[in-house]
Amino acid sequence: MTEVVKIDKQDGIGILTLNRPESLNALTQELARYIADSLIELDKASNVSGIVLTGAGDRSFCAGVDLEEALTVKVEEIEGWFGTICNIYRQILLTDKPVIAALNGVAAGGGFQMALVSDQRIAHHQTKMGQPEINAGIPSIMGSYWMSLHLGWSKNQELSMTGRLLGGEEGQQLGLINHLVKKDELITKACSVASEFSQKPPNAWKRTKHRFREIALSGFEEAFRAGVLGQQEAYAKGEPQKIMTAFLQKKLK
């Protein structure tokens, strides 16, 4: 059985790769748990000074939740299902070591949100990113919360309510992308940034990251509750199921 995550080490940097390229590295419950557990493992590892988060293949960093799995979720299961996904974001924030997102392709929905809570985001010119959930009948609530930490109200509303994906250059112009590089330089640059951060005075780095963590988590529980309620209502009305079914049937043709 193929491992859903891979962990490699390069000059003291742990490279955590989402390994479902055939499904655009979409998040299943299994993958979400492995990501969170791997982050804990790498944060504890004495031979790792920083972490790079990326996706297998050259098409996608992470395309969001796995639609085939999402289609089977029942209303009463949504809180637990959504909680498993959101635990990734919490764990990225709780990781004391630098976490750099290397966006090797599409970063959508939950994939985009993983990037938003990372310490920096590296992308290439063909990278696409954004919050397309609304187009699948799912309210864009957790994503709009994370975007509020990066963007003003107007741009956040636009991206949350249209589901439009940004290109790498626009993402950089908006301040969402820290470095835009050639595709074949992505991992090298991400490792370089992680290494640079890891060499900062350790206590100053730790306390600075802790403060950003406190700010980010201050509204997390409220956004989570709102996200659960929004998805429960959407699923009860059947909107996401209809849209996802139509999309998956179209893929099979």
Image (spheres, grey):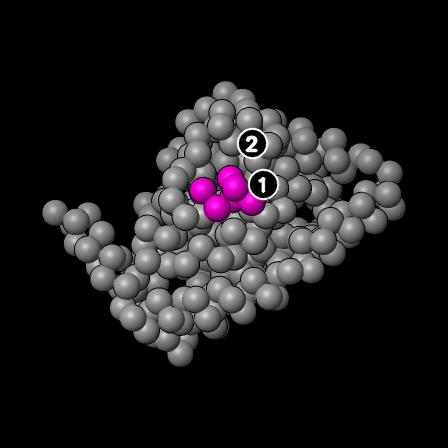
SS for callout 2? loop
As drawn, is 65 to the left or to the right of 90?
A: left
In the image, residue 211 lies at what x, y percent? 78, 51
- The residue lying at 73 percent from left, 42 percent from top is 49
* Dot 2 amino acid type: Leu
Residue 244 rendering spot, x and y as whole percentages:
26, 57
**Residue 70 rendering spot, x and y as whole percentages:** 34, 63
In this orientation, does residue 179 appear?
Answer: yes
At 83% from the left and 49% from the top, the residue drawn is: 207
Q: Is residue 37 above or below residue 48?
A: below
For this rendering, which residue is in front, 217 or 11? Answer: 217
State which quadrant residue 8 falls in: top right
**Mark 1 packing: few (<14 Cα in 10 Å), some, or many (20+)?**
some
> With 126 as the anchor, is 135 left or right in this view?
left
Is residue 71 highlighted in magenta? no
Magenta stretch, overall SS: helix
**Extreme residue in the bottom direction:** 76
Of 79 and 252, nearer the camera is 79
Counting residues from the start of the chain, the first of labels 1 and 2 encountered is 1
Q: Is residue 154 magenta?
A: yes
Amino acid type, residue under disc 1 in the picture: Leu
Disc 1 to disc 2, C-alpha distance: 8 Å
Residue tagged 1: 151
Viewer-nearest residue: 146 or 84: 146
Q: Is residue 98 above or below residue 2?
A: above
Tag 1 and tag 2, C-beta contact below 8 Å = yes
The magenta-colored residue range is: 152-158
The residue pinned by badge 2 equals 174
Tag count: 2
Q: Position of residue 162 (x, y in %)?
A: 38, 44
**What numbered label is drawn on residue 219?**
none
